[in-house]
Image: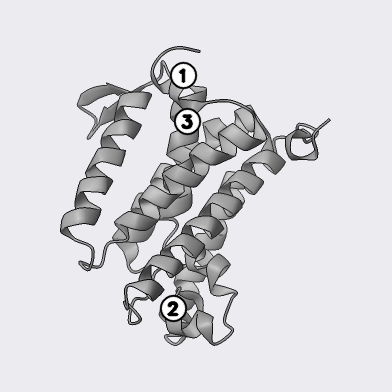
Amino acid sequence: MNVLRRPFRYRNDNAVLFLIGINILVFILQQLIRPLTGYTALNPVAISSGWVWQFVTYMFAHGGMSHLLFNMLALFIFGTQVERYMGSKEFILYYLLTGILAGVFSFGVYWFTGAYEVFLLGASGAVFAVQLAYAILFPDAVIYIWGILPLRAPIMVLGFTLIELFSSIIGFRNGVAHLTHLAGFGFGWLYFLIRFGKNPWYALAGRR
């Protein structure tokens, strides 16, 4: 069997709850130890100086309470279902790998465009990848936006992708990491292609 597609033994250990707990703990520490944000957020200059751990730690630091709550709510709603389907080991690999690669991609963009002052933080890249996985695995699921507007999960994901693409074009330097969100989608898409041999488009388009 291709080592890239070798499955893990299935277990559901509620890893989503542990990830949420780590994010909350890091946020509390950020409030207590102010310099911590500078050590954990992804900054192109810091990484070029050897602070490569920021490719991982930026995913667990957040810029404010609303930022944290939005990401953790999305991770809980979508992540618990994805983890239950994939198993915890697969889910953790998916979450961390897509998040790290989204950070690497963002670093490359910021570095080559001269945006050296950027401090990127938040779980959004990985969370957007989780939302993509949810739409792929549960294409018939209906999500109620703001608790009112019903949308099938694939429509929601494709809509978010278009919004992020448009936002990245008109607001590259507005402080929101739209390219990181798109990178999360992109690396999640590649994960399904490479790891599972499954083209996400078929699920999103209703052709399983």
Whole-percent x, y for residue 72 in the image: 43, 50
User: Does 130 appear above or below 97?
Assistant: above
User: Does 133 appear above or below 74?
Assistant: above
Whole-percent x, y for residue 113 in the image: 32, 73
SS at badge 3: helix
Residue pictured at 55% horizontal, 59% vertical: 100
Q: Determine whether label 1 and label 2 are within 8 Å by CB.
A: no
Distance of label 3 from label 1 (alpha carbons) = 14 Å
Rendered image: mark on residue 134: 3
Residue pictured at 34% horizontal, 69% vertical: 63
In the drawing, does residue 172 fall left or right of residue 20?
left
Q: Nearer the viewer, mark 2 or mark 3?
A: 2
Q: Classify mark 3: residues with Cα within 10 Å, few (<14), some (14-19) or many (20+).
A: many
Residue 86 location, quadrant: top right
Whole-percent x, y for residue 207 in the image: 45, 12
Tell me the amino acid under the disc marked 1: Tyr
Q: Classify mark 1: residues with Cα within 10 Å, few (<14), some (14-19) or many (20+).
A: few
Which residue does the numbered mark 2 point to in the structure image?
44
Tell me the amino acid under the disc marked 2: Pro
